[in-house]
Image (cartoon, grey):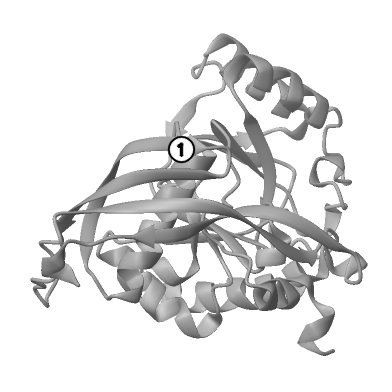
């Protein structure tokens, strides 16, 4: 099948930017459940998965801030007992009976009780890649390939990372989509050929700029600013850390901020052309892209924030 039959390919052609498109939530919950039972709506999974969690999630989000619940799986996964991973708390409830899943979540979020079901700290980093083909075929095609290759490279490098296949993460038009925890970094359009560079950046504690969507715990404008600055640094091969300051909305369609830079001490190639700070200005721009693979002919107009300008000082032109 031609790539033109996939929404992620057509979205890339439209020029719709990645920066600032990460799914936002105050809390992310991942429940292990075999992929063969997933339905279009992940929380309507079969195989004895407890029903009603979608309604509970919406109601509890009004109290605790937005909660996002997703399912995760890997080859050979059983569901007689499950694991529940919660971020940013970085806690895991292990060997939970399926019928106890609602009670665990209720205890954790409503009562702040982490002892009744014995929560433990998550020890390994986790990469979650959407392979939810029943939700969109882009995720089956591009996500599955990325998950398989990511698992191969992680094992080859003997890296202490768990690779999970995830249900819909949001933004299948950016497939393959991926979340990296505990940092909460979101990626899209990452190709299997880029995995070695992604893992190398990750090892240095750096964001992989070319495929970066944003950080899931940041608000929309914070995501846009932070992700665009990451892209800006990546295009210039700058190895540095930075902080976003003075974020200010100028109008309904424009905002600005200042990025304060600090050179990475771990870089093997010291760079002297990195400025101390740069101002960035963003504007809204419309992009037309498909709603999904099942509606390729239906183009949806999306207003996205785009980098309008940055004005470096004369020393850094």
Q: Is residue 177 visible?
A: yes
Looking at the image, is 146 positioned above or below residue 184?
below
Looking at the image, is 192 positioned above or below residue 217?
below
Q: Quadrant of residue 80?
A: top right
Front residue of 5/64: it is 5
- Residue 29: x %, y % from top left: 61, 37
Give left or right: position of 201 versus 292.
Answer: left
Instruction: Give the residue at x 68% y 44%.
Output: 70
Residue at the bottom extreme, as displayed: 2
According to the image, label 1 marks what residue?
250
- Residue 167: x %, y % from top left: 72, 53
Q: How many marks?
A: 1
Q: Quadrant of residue 313?
A: bottom left
Give left or right: position of 38 versus 109.
Answer: right
- Residue 172: x %, y % from top left: 72, 61
- Residue 9: x %, y % from top left: 71, 78
Give left or right: position of 62 versus 294.
Answer: left
Q: Mark 1: few, some, or many residues within 10 Å (few <14, many ≥20)?
A: few
Instruction: Give the residue at x 86% y 61%.
Output: 134
Front residue of 224/280: it is 280
Front residue of 72/224: it is 224
Q: Is residue 75 visible?
A: no
Instruction: Give the residue at x 21% y 67%.
Output: 239
What is the quadrant of the N terminus in the image? bottom right
Instruction: Give the residue at x 79% y 29%.
Output: 53
Secondary structure category for the residue under label 1: strand
């Amino acid at each position: 099948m031609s790539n033109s039959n996939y929404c992620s390919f057509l979205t890339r052609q439209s020029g719709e930017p990645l920066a600032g498109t990460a799914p936002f939530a105050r809390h992310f919950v991942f429940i292990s459940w075999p992929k063969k039972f997933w339905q279009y709506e992940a929380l309507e999974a079969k195989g004895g998965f407890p029903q009603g969690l979608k309604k509970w999630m919406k109601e509890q989000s009004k109290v605790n801030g937005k909660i996002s619940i997703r399912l995760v799986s890997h080859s050979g996964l059983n569901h007689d007992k499950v694991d529940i991973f919660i971020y940013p708390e970085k806690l895991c409830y292990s060997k939970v009976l399926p019928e106890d899943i609602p009670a665990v979540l209720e205890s954790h979020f409503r009562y702040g009780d982490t002892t009744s079901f014995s929560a433990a700290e998550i020890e390994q980093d986790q990469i979650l890649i959407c392979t939810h083909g029943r939700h969109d075929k882009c995720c089956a095609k591009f996500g599955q390939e990325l998950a398989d290759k990511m698992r191969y490279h992680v094992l080859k490098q003997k890296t202490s990372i768990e690779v999970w296949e995830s249900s819909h993460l949001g933004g299948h038009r950016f497939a393959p989509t991926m979340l990296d925890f505990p940092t909460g970094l979101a990626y899209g359009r990452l190709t299997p050929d880029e995995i070695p560079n992604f893992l190398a950046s990750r090892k240095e504690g750096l964001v992989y700029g070319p495929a970066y969507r944003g950080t899931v715990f940041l608000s929309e404008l914070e995501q846009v600013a932070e992700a665009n600055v990451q892209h800006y640094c990546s295009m210039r091969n700058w190895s540095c850390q930075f902080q976003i300051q003075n974020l200010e909305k100028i109008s309904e369609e424009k905002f600005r901020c200042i990025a304060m830079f600090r050179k990475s001490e771990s870089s093997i190639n010291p760079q002297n052309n990195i400025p101390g700070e740069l101002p960035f200005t963003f504007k809204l721009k419309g992009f037309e892209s498909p709603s999904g693979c099942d509606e390729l002919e239906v183009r949806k107009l999306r207003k996205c924030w785009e980098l309008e300008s940055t004005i470096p000082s004369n020393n850094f032109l």
